[in-house]
Amino acid sequence: MLIGELKEQLDGLRSNQEQNLAALNSWQIEQEQVTGQLEHRTKQFNENIKNIKQEMQELHAQQPEDRLYSRAQKMVKLGAGIDELVAECQLPKVEAEMLIAMYQRQSSSKK
């Protein structure tokens, strides 16, 4: 009778152990999936950061050129000539001529 009870307890313990092992395996699979998702998101974030940094570098590289054109436009509005734009803003003569022509068209169309 004692041996029978011990066998029942042992079977119960084995059953509990199997259930716990199954639950642990299920949890491990779930954690691996979550880890995979987090790794994917991290990779996407890093790629986004890389793209944003590249865009910022391009914008910074573009700013000095934009400043020269802004300055050239202001100078044209103040009456600067082609030679002055070429010298002060380091523009090619053709671009200086175009800026002046564009300003003159805008001025004449407003009148």
Image (cartoon, grey):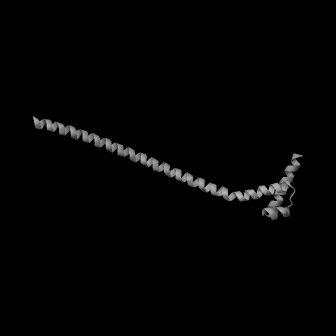
Quarter holding the N terminus is top left
Q: Position of residue 31 (x, y in %)?
A: 39, 45
Q: Is residue 25 visible?
A: yes
Q: Position of residue 81 (x, y in %)?
A: 86, 60
Q: Nearer the viewer, residue 13 or 109?
A: 13
Question: Which residue appears at 85% of the width and 62% of the height?
Answer: 82
Q: Position of residue 76 (x, y in %)?
A: 84, 56
Residue 18 left/right relative to 49: left
Instruction: Determine which quarter of the picture holds residue 64.
Output: bottom right
Residue 60 left/right relative to 107: left
Residue 29 left/right relative to 40: left
Question: Which residue appears at 81% of the width and 65% of the height?
Answer: 87
Residue 43 left/right relative to 73: left
Instruction: Determine which quarter of the picture holds residue 94.
Output: bottom right
Whether 24 is drawn above or below 85: the answer is above
Whether 84 is drawn above or below 5: the answer is below
Instruction: Determine which quarter of the picture holds residue 18.
Output: top left
Question: Which residue appears at 73% of the width and 56% of the height?
Answer: 66
Question: Which residue appears at 58% of the width and 54% of the height?
Answer: 51
Count the numbered circles shown: 0
Q: Is residue 93 visible?
A: no
Q: Residue furthest left?
A: 1
Q: Position of residue 46 (x, y in %)?
A: 53, 53
Whether 5 is drawn above or below 62: the answer is above
